Image (tube, grey):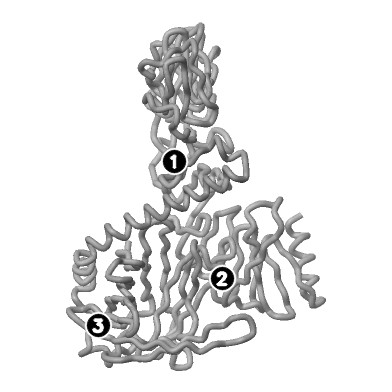
Amino acid sequence: MKKAIMALGYLLLLNGCASVVGNFRLNPDIQKVSYNVSYSHYQPANYVEMKNVDFSTFTYLNDNYAKDKNYVYHWGAAIPFADPASFTIVTGPFAYDKQHVFRFGDIVPGLSPTNLTLLEVNDEPFGATYLRSNSQIWFNGIAQFQPFTPCDIDTFKVITRNTSYHAKDSQCVYYEGKVIDGADPRTFKVKYDSHGVDKNNVYFKHHVLPDLNAAKLKRMSLHIVKDQNSVYYKDKKLDADISTFQKNGSYFNDKNHVYFDGQIVQGADPETFKGRSGLYFGRDKNGCYSKHEPVSCDTKPTSPLLSLLSYTKDVDLDDMTTQEGKANAFSQIFKNIAKENKASKEKWQKGFASLVETKKSELNHAYLTPENADKIDLSKLPQDYHFDIFKPGPGSRTLSYHFKGIESEQAIFAIFNRSTKGVMLEKRTLSGQPIVTNQPIGKSFITFKYLPFECTTQLGICSHTLAEIDGESTEQKVSQFNISYQDGLWTRSLKEGDKKDIFLFDEFGMPVIHATFLEDKLHTLWFRKVKG
């Protein structure tokens, strides 16, 4: 079916019509490719133009990947280090080129593309996968891929599909790539996602659960199982009354106690307790509870998912059934994000001097000064020159700069970012000056905003012209800055106003730190990540 869709798409291209192939829309009339950023098939398509795609060589590979002669794209965004010429799809999210193995666009560190065999593949982002590379097995669940050497690699196999955390060979049984001590590979079977059974025992992950009868085993939740005599939470046996033990919302109770995550909720009355499904909240005749703790009944309930996100604090989930309630909830979320953002900025402002000294040390003090600024020669850049620059705090973002080479006496840098469809390019003269100065690389609340331009290393007064496009009219906006330097840091101050940018550059004039201050308070911070 997929091949038929691709064939239809390219047939339409030949006839000069825009076509849709997977999530890509190809328009030969304007030589552009767009990517559908809608999160659901039930939403209308929302196509965003991909930047700097070579239309003539653009090729759809599968629902995860596409490529042209210059770049490989995952879900519409160019991915660093991928070689288009040798890039090959294995299946679903897995691919490789001459140097790397990729999963969902990310390099699997340490995994060689040579002699690679996929034993089990889960296409979900957090699915479990086993691969064989030479004499090792690599396993990935929620964490990163890790290699291990099985007891007998020639008989190694994954036990079940989709719930593929378990595997075995002729000698051993494994969960998440680690041996389950004592498990019998001949009789071992997967009972539930994390539970297995053999002729002797019931297991939770790597742990034996004594006294459980595999034939009578029943799962009550992801981590709770019971038989006719015992109840276990993970690998812990509960002192519960088996005949009255039951689920109660996000809690459990028997005739004696209320339980949350395998622990007794002290003071809770099991007879009158009512737990909320999907929420860490319950109440009884005595009061209310959040998880294990007694709380005011005015406390806003939290859900297992939303409790992982600090900015959902004080969001009233009960009130989100109405439009007004949803508006109040989002208003509170934005307040929480603003509070987190303020705290992050205050933290980094206090540590800014220390950050500067750390980055100077990482450069071995080979940073840009007024004495060497006019000696920049980007033709001497190493071919593998690259770095990541990071924006901390809520909505943290990383830009990955890669030197692509010299064209027409210009140094070309590709800037990769998962939120940008296609790839952004930055061009500089060989003396290090940005060539495109009147437009940002990209900006939005959830992506990034980073704008290097000529007023950075010219000491004294510097003027910058920015073309602001509003509809069909273009307004030229001229700003004047004062550029100063002290101990490795270049300061660009707006002549009229309280804004200033502070930079630390490497010897090639590329950013290592870029901090923006408004009225002496940190507003935005970018800094390089350490390689590796």
255, 31: nearer the viewer: 255
290, 95: nearer the viewer: 290
- The dot on residue 368 is 3
**Residue at x 74%, y 59% (from the top left corner):** 3
Q: Residues within 10 Å of mark 2 (few under 14, many from 20)?
A: many
**Residue at x 66%, y 76% (from the top left corner):** 32
Q: Earlier in the sequence, mark 3 or mark 2?
A: 3
The reply to whether residue 98 is in sight is: no
Determine whether the residue tagged by mark 2 lies in a helix, strand or loop: loop
Q: Mark 2 points at which residue?
A: 422
Tell me the amino acid under the disc marked 2: Gly
Determine whether the residue tagged by mark 1 lies in a helix, strand or loop: loop
8 to 243, vertically: above or below: below
**Residue at x 28%, y 92% (from the top left corner):** 374
Q: Residue furthest right?
A: 15
As measured in the structure, the alpha-carbon distance from the residue carrying label 3 to the one carrying label 2 is 31 Å
Tell me the amino acid under the disc marked 3: Leu
Tell me the amino acid under the disc marked 1: Asp
